[in-house]
Image (cartoon, rainbow, N blue to C red):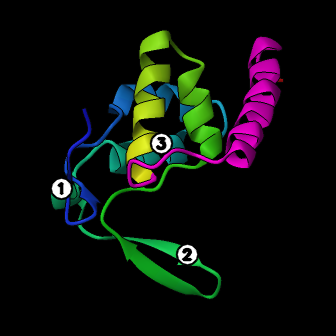
Amino acid sequence: MLRWENGGLLEPPFSYDELYRVLLRIVPEAEAVELARTASSSVAEHGPVHRRRGLAYESVSDVWLSNDTLILLSLESDELRARVEEHRYATRGEQSESATERAEWERRHAELKAWADSGYR
């Protein structure tokens, strides 16, 4: 179970190995190493993270993972799929997603699954 405190993630939801394996398919190796390291460590280990919002940057207390990264993680195993859903639920403030959000998730999931099934070509 994910633990949240003051709106921030205390424990990273995914391990370095899990993230690295997925990220390596979509970014160069050096970037996969850095992103996986940052996303799998606690904020205390890597310091504050800033996410770009338009022209400005905002501090975030946990590392933001894109829906595409989450979907690719969910394709790895049933256990990871369950953890991705748990993470998505927690990041929505434990609110249900709308039908539109779910439909968009399923649409993108199908696209990325087809890409994965083709060997990521």
- The residue under label 3 is 88
Q: Is residue 28 visible?
A: no
Q: Which SS type dominates the magenta stretch? A: helix
Is label 3 or label 2 in front?
3
Q: Is residue 71 above or below residue 10?
A: above
| Circle nearer the viewer, 2 or 1 | 2
Q: Which residues are magenta?
A: 92-119
Residue hosting label 1: 45
Kind of residue indicated by mark 2:
Arg
Q: What is the C-alpha distance between the residues marked 3 and 2?
A: 20 Å
Report the residue at 74% width, 19% height from top: 116
Query: 10 Å neighbourhood of mark 2: few (<14), some, or many (≥20)?
Result: few
Expressed as whole percent of the image width and height from the top left, the position of residue 111 reads 82, 29
Which of marks 1 and 2 precedes in the sequence?
1
Q: Amino acid at mark 1?
A: Glu
Q: Please tell me which residue is depicted at 32% across the width and 31% down the height of the picture.
A: 15
User: Is 101 situated above or below 113?
Assistant: below
Which residue bears the numbered disc 2?
52
Question: Dot 1 surroundings within 10 Å: few (below 14), some, or many (20 or more)?
Answer: few
In 3D space, how far apart are the residues under numbered discs 3 and 1 (Cα atoms)? 23 Å
Quadrant where the image shows the C terminus:
top right
Residue 35, percent from left and from top: 45, 48
